[in-house]
Every structure is written in structure tokens, then in C-alpha cells.
Image (cartoon, helix red, strand yellow):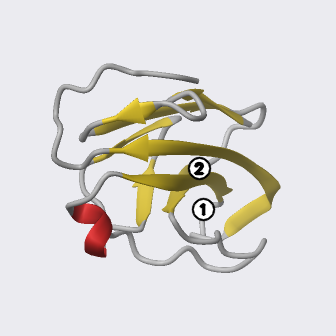
Amino acid sequence: MRFVSPAGGSFHGLPLELRWTARREAVSYAVFVDRAPVRVGERIPEAGIDVLAATGPDARLVRLAGAAASETRDHHLVVVTVDGRGRRLGETAAVVDVRIDPIATDVPEVGG
């Protein structure tokens, strides 16, 4: 599994469109924002600011938590596969680090 977009090290505003590829189809995916993903077999937390749920290989990050909601910062994104019971499926993950200005809405992709 790997991120298609955004590119690592790139600079963005919000919302940020996320896309990834996966060799194995999953029932769904979970994107962890600035936090470690759960271990294999553990239940995925309820979707919110730091966990996004996706039924396909894409998601949209529309807001950030805490001080990151108003400051330009680096962010760590991790996507994992999820089974039909809402648990992490396997060790495979896509990881990317990007810089986000949460106030900007039209920042072209820079870097990567």
C-alpha cells in the first residue's frame, strides 16, 4: 500500500484530498492523523478529527485538532486496511508526512 497523493514533504491547505493504492482489497480503510494506528486485530476508533473512515482508496481531510487547527505544521498520516468487523487487517500501511496550512484553501502542491 502507498500514498498516491499527497506527495511526501508537500505543502497544502485544507481540505486535503488523500488517495492511496492497495494490493489487497479491504472492506474499508482508516486514516490516522498525527497518531499511531491501532495494532493488528484491534478495533478502529470511532471516526473523528484524528481518525478518518473510508470505504475506498480515498478520503478528505477537512480539519485538524488542537493548535494544529490554526497553525501551519507538519502532519503524519497513516492508512490501514479494516475488516468487516471494524478491526485492523494486517501490518500493511501507507505513510506520508506533509505540511498543512489549515487556514489556506487554495495552496498548490509544493515539494514532494
Residue sitting farthest toward the right:
91
Q: Does dot 2 land on a helix, a strand or a loop?
A: loop
* Quarter of the image that includes the C terminus: top right
* Callout 2 crowding tier (Cα within 10 Å): few <14, some 14–19, many ≥20: some
Residue at point 44% right, 43% down? 99
Coordinates of residue 93 in the picture (x, y in percent): 73, 50
Residue named by callout 2: 27
> Nearest the camera: 17 or 41?
17
Q: Does dot 1 land on a helix, a strand or a loop?
A: loop
Amino acid type at circle 1 is: Gly
Coordinates of residue 51 in the picture (x, y in percent): 44, 66
* Image position of 98 (left or right of 78): left
* Image position of 41 (left or right of 52): right
Residue at point 24% right, 49% down? 102
Q: Quadrant of residue 2?
A: top right
Amino acid type at circle 2 is: Val
> Nearest the camera: 65 or 4?
65
* Quarter of the image that includes the N terminus: top right
* Callout 1 crowding tier (Cα within 10 Å): few <14, some 14–19, many ≥20: few
Coordinates of residue 59 in the picture (x, y in percent): 40, 41
Residue at point 24% right, 63% down? 69
The relative height of residue 33 versus residue 9 in the rendered view (above or below) is below
> Nearest the camera: 71 or 50?
71
Res. 64 mark: none
> Nearest the camera: 88 or 104?
104
Residue named by callout 1: 84
What is the distance, in whole Å, between disc 2 and disc 1 at their CAs?
Answer: 6 Å
Query: Pointers 2 and 1 in contact (CB under 8 A)?
Result: yes
Q: Quadrant of residue 22?
A: top right
Q: Point out the tag, 2 or 1, that comes first from the N-terminus.
A: 2
